[in-house]
Structures are given as structure tokens and as C-alpha cells.
Amino acid sequence: MIFSAMPPQVITAPLACIVQRFTYGPSDEHYRTIFDSVQTSARSETWSSNERIAEKFASLENLRADWNAGESETPNPVTKLQARLIVEELLSKQLSPTAIMPSVEGGIGITIVRGERRGSIEILNSGEMVAATYESSGDPDVWEFESEKQSIIDTVEKISVYMSA
């Protein structure tokens, strides 16, 4: 779905839209783009098995440096570890990722989809971590969080509450 067997434009589309939202600021057009791109990933299967998630992380380990025509860094070891910790916390809240993919900003993006509701987390190689919750109507809630365990727990809890509402 998102790794080397697929063309780079498929790999980068969902996170590229989210990165645009974080980089260029709020606008209805960006919100619609985010929602539409994640809607596409929601049509894919949700990963509920640890084996499937392990497979996605293994693909990230083997990601080639030119995964998107050399435009972006591959996720670094610290980013990969942080993403694994976040996914473990998501699973502890019965939130199975819909997508785990490399970020065009250099890092890893994680998306959770339940019905019309979306949650996204992006862990960048720079150490920045950003999360968002959103749906087709209304403004997204976007926030930065820290790599400390409690900050990750708080972020996952916030996404869990939103997804369950």
C-alpha cells in the first residue's frame, strides 16, 4: 500500500497534504485536501495484526534513499523508534493505524481512520512531533507534542477520545 512496491506519488500523497497544512497554515482548501487524501487511505484495510504492523516497519527499515526521487530523507533510527512507541500506545487504546508511511518532510506519518473521523501523527527526523484530529466539516485540531512518554500518552489519549466521540 505505501512502500517500495508502489509508485512514489502514492507513497507521498497523504502526508504531503498534511505537511502542506502544517507548513502553509489553515485554509478550507487545505482541510479538504487533507480529508480527501486520508479518505483514500481509509479504503484500504486497517492493520489490526502485529505481524502486519511489523511488516510495515520492516519496509521502513529497507526504504531506499531515493524513495521519492531523492527529495526527502529516509526516517532516521530515533524517528523509527519513536514511531514504534507511538504505535504501541495506539494499539493499547484499540486504535489500529490505517497507514504508517514515510514523510516527505523526512520522518514517519501514522494515520488512524474511524468513519468520518481522522487522527494523524507525524514524527520528523528533526525531532518535531505533530498530531491532528479532523473530519470533513469543521476545523482540524493540530498540536505539537514532545517525545517524552507522558506527552505521547497524552496525545494518544486525546486522539482516542476524539475517535470515540
Image (cartoon, rainbow, N blue to C red):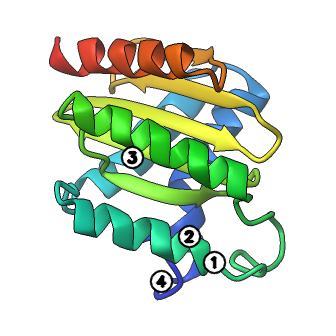
Marks 4 & 3, CB-CB < 8 Å contact = no
Marks 4 and 1, the one that precedes in the sequence: 4
Q: CA distance from mark 4 to mark 3?
A: 17 Å
- Classify residue 115 as left or right of residue 158: left
**Disc 4, disc 1: CB below 8 Å?**
no
Residue at the spot of label 1? 63
Which one is in front, 44 or 95?
95
Q: Mark 2 touching mark 1, by CB under 8 A? A: yes
SS category of the residue bearing label 2: helix
For residue 6, the mark is 4
Mark 1 and mark 3: Cα distance apart in space: 22 Å
Give the residue drawn at x 54%, y 26%.
Answer: 131
Q: Write down the residue under mark 3.
A: 38
Q: Residue furthest front?
A: 149
Residue type, label 2: Leu
Mark 2, residue position: 60
Mark 1 or 3: in front is 1
Callouts 2 and 4 close, C-beta under 8 Å: no
